[in-house]
Amino acid sequence: MNASNLDLFDAEEAPVATRERIGERAIVLRGLALSYVPELLPALEAIGRAAPFRHMTTPGGLRMSVALTNCGALGWTSDAHGYRYTRRDPQTGQPWPAMPAPFLRLARAAAAEAGFEDFRPDACLVNRYLPGTRLSLHQDRDEHDFAAPIVSVSLGIPAVFLFGGHARADRAARIPLHHGDVLVWGGPDRLRYHGVLPVKEAHHPLLGGQRINFTFREAGRP
Ligand code: MD6
Ligand code: FE
């Protein structure tokens, strides 16, 4: 190996994304978002200014421990009447912030890597976890049809993702997710139960003591 080859393996180089298949059509693309982070973070701050993170209430009257906001044409909301997608932020009365171009590029690239061509997300749910925040087992079934995959991006401090089966009581695999990891799932895995264990205290150099998750969906009518 000569010097120029060695340069290719310099520790400064971004690691090549590795793939872990966790279901028939579910895959973790390790580190795929890393090269997008410099564009994602300023866009995330702008979203948070226009549509602040808030704790929603479930139809059962419980306050969600995850704080959330949205970007894209449709935003996911929850209140006493149920879960649904809306065109406007109920808190400001304004349309949700537009989906930033690098968000869309990342989501489409991840879907294509996972074999889902021409993913056209119209909704991006942005979740914020502080230490102790958890997300209980749920299915994502508020979208208009389930043919499209979901693309989920993890940033900041790590978390353990629970990936269950089609019944709530099915045993769930524990999948650690780190800064830059992208999870794509669809097809027969689209309606599997999943959640996030309580996040442990940690520090991330760019995001401090928080975990941010984006989930991209095709939520509306085609
Ligand atoms: C999270 N994610 O990772 C929460 N849903 O913070 C989800 O609820 C989720 O990551 C559907 C598909 C992928 C996900
Ligand atoms: Fe979900």
Image: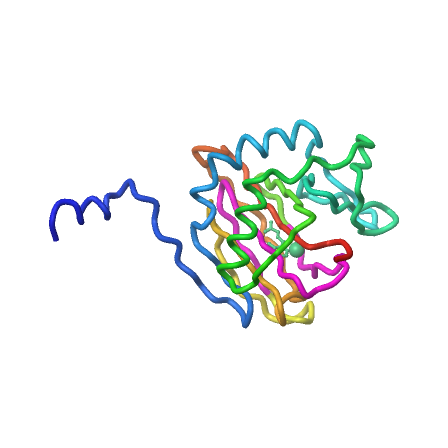
In the image, ligand 1 is in what quadrant? bottom right
Q: How is the image coloured?
A: rainbow
Q: Report the number of numbered marks.
A: 0
Place residue 146 in its image quadrant.
bottom right
**Which residue: 73% across, 54% down?**
219
**Which residue: 45% across, 36% down?**
204
Residue 99 on image: x %, y % = 64, 40
Q: Residue furthest top?
A: 49
Place residue 192 in its image quadrant.
bottom right
Residue 131 on image: x %, y % = 56, 40
Q: Is residue 151 part of the magenta span, yes or no?
A: yes
Residue 83, compared with residue 35, is above or below; it is: below
Q: Is residue 106 part of the magenta span, yes or no?
A: no
Q: Residue furthest left?
A: 2
Range of the magenta residues?
135-163
**Which residue: 70% across, 31% down?**
52
Answer with left or right where residue 102 lies relative to residue 71: left
Residue 18, compared with residue 45, is above or below; it is: below
Answer with left or right where residue 26 lies relative to residue 190: left
Residue 120 on image: x %, y % = 64, 53
Front residue of 82/43: it is 43
Front residue of 121/175: it is 121
Residue 29 on image: x %, y % = 46, 56
Answer with left or right where residue 146 lies relative to residue 103: right
Place residue 140 in its image quadrant.
bottom right
**Which residue: 77% across, 45% down?**
77
Front residue of 25/218: it is 218
Which of the image's four quarters has the C terminus?
bottom right
